[in-house]
Amino acid sequence: MASARATDPPASRDPPTLPLYLPLPPPPPLPSPHHRLLPPPMAPILMRLHPAFLTQMDYHRTTSLLQDEGGIPSPEANKKREQVIRKLNKIVMDWAKVVAYEQRVPPRRTTATVLTYGSYTLGAHGPESDIDALCVGPCIATLQYHFFIVLRQILEDRPEVSEMQTVESAKVPLMRFRFSGISVDFTYAQLPAIITSNPHLLQKLDSRSWRSLSGVRVNKQIVQLVPNTQKFQILLRCIKLWTKRRGIHCHLLGFFAGIHLAILAAYVCQRYPYGTINGLFTIFFDIFAHWNWQIPVSLHGQPTNCRRPDGSFMPILLPCTPPEFCASNMTKGTFKKIREELMRGYALTKEPWRHDFEWVWLFAPFPYATKYEEFLRIALCAPTSEELRDWAGWVKSRFRNLILKLESIGVECDPDSTEEVDHTVFEPSIVCHWGLVYKTSTHLDISSLGEDFMKDVINDVYGKVKCTHSKLTMSIVRSSQLPKSLYSHSVYTTYIPQYMLGYQTPTDYIGAAG
């Protein structure tokens, strides 16, 4: 399928044949003094490929991609998720009655419900994907007390619930737990009135509840805007697998969030409604490897007066009214890695006629252990597993500030989302390793860095309470000191021909966040 740029006209049918540029032959050896100079090499030879050949190659790549796109949940697994949602809905309905009794409000006048969004609702979830769920409660049920204390206690008393963790001071506060073994991210929206049948009441939501509800609204819009839901679901699943393998899918660490990927996938599907799965995935890399990030990605295809967030590196508009930008934690360094991975994906997929192409090259795990010589080791520990989950969630919500601090002193970092256990301590613990690249000769004072970050972590009463019995330590380690499990992700035997990686790393980052 023909490649496209961000400024291309609307989608059209492919031409019957596509040009094939044969690579130049290797340069001849240097001539000896006894031989005359050879003429300069010929220009690239322009050839044409037969449509039947291109169709056959496209079919082959699509078939192999569908086999490599990642696990698709079984019907039994999907039924289990449906049961989890039904049980959660019953729990919050009973919880609303408890709140009504406490507030001396007639129970018949209060109600609550559970709405889902994210990859599960879009149909692009995998066996290990979590469920993004929103608890919509009555105005008498407050976030801090009734949701985070009363409802949390009700959930913790259930035998199906485990690994409860709360993130209360985030932009979108949530509870994170496992229900019957399935991970659930549970947010809350407080309705402005007791009776919820009037849709106009949604316009009076407070800002925090409105942000919580945005995931549900955006999901509904995306499903309506894509021309072929099944192709969109497959493409999104492929993109998510690629971002996870290459270490660029973690919103807290400054990379993509799920909503970013859903909108980018929907944009490609909108422009190429007749594309094959292979064609859509290939064009995804072509479009966004060359995108001018001064221009926001929008599914409505029209200018907006919505003010772009300060410091935004990859502006992506939510398809909702009024228009607003996706929240992003990207920094200069994480944006650079995303651009590099997009360009790598483009270099690997840009030549559809290659017989020797394998999708395993694209989905190869990012080789952290061999890519970087030094790592920032961040270790978190707490007296109990429950306290560790709360402590880790709170610290991770502050990771962007740590990344920005490193960048401000001339150190780029590549945060690996993989977590290890610190076997040198008896308390429950997790350890993270971030690859480091020193852009200047500045010495990294790890003691000062740790102190500055801890000040940010305990900048309010909530943070001070969290760290009362918990610890955070930092150190610099060499790649040879990494756990063996990280090396297992970095070593793979598949050989990638050098001509397939002959691309130039994008360097036009200046002004990207203007």
Image (cartoon, grey):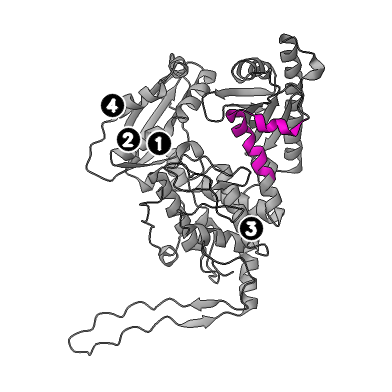
User: Left of 407 or right of it: where is 259?
Assistant: right
Q: Earlier in the sequence, mark 4 or mark 3?
A: 3
Res. 437 image quadrant: top left
Callout in the foreground (2, 4): 4
Residue located farthest toward the right when viewing the structure as drawn? 108
Task: Give the residue type at disc 4.
Answer: Ser
Callout in the foreground (4, 3): 3
Q: Which residues are magenta?
A: 198-220
Q: Earlier in the sequence, mark 3 or mark 1?
A: 3
Q: Is residue 510 magenta?
A: no
Disc 4 vs disc 1: Cβ atoms closer than 8 Å?
Answer: no
Identify the residue under disc 3. 269
Cα–Cα gap, marks 2 and 1:
9 Å
Secondary structure under badge 3?
helix
Identify the residue under disc 4. 447
Cα–Cα gap, marks 4 and 3:
49 Å
Task: Give the residue type at disc 2.
Answer: Val
Identify the residue under disc 1. 433
Identify the residue under disc 2. 477
Callout in the foreground (3, 1): 3
Secondary structure under badge 4?
helix
Which residue lies at the image location 64% right of the left edge and 31% below the top edge? 184
Q: Foreground residue, 43 or 223?
A: 223
Q: Is residue 207 magenta?
A: yes
**In this rendering, does residue 408 appear at all?**
yes
Task: Give the residue type at disc 3.
Answer: Cys
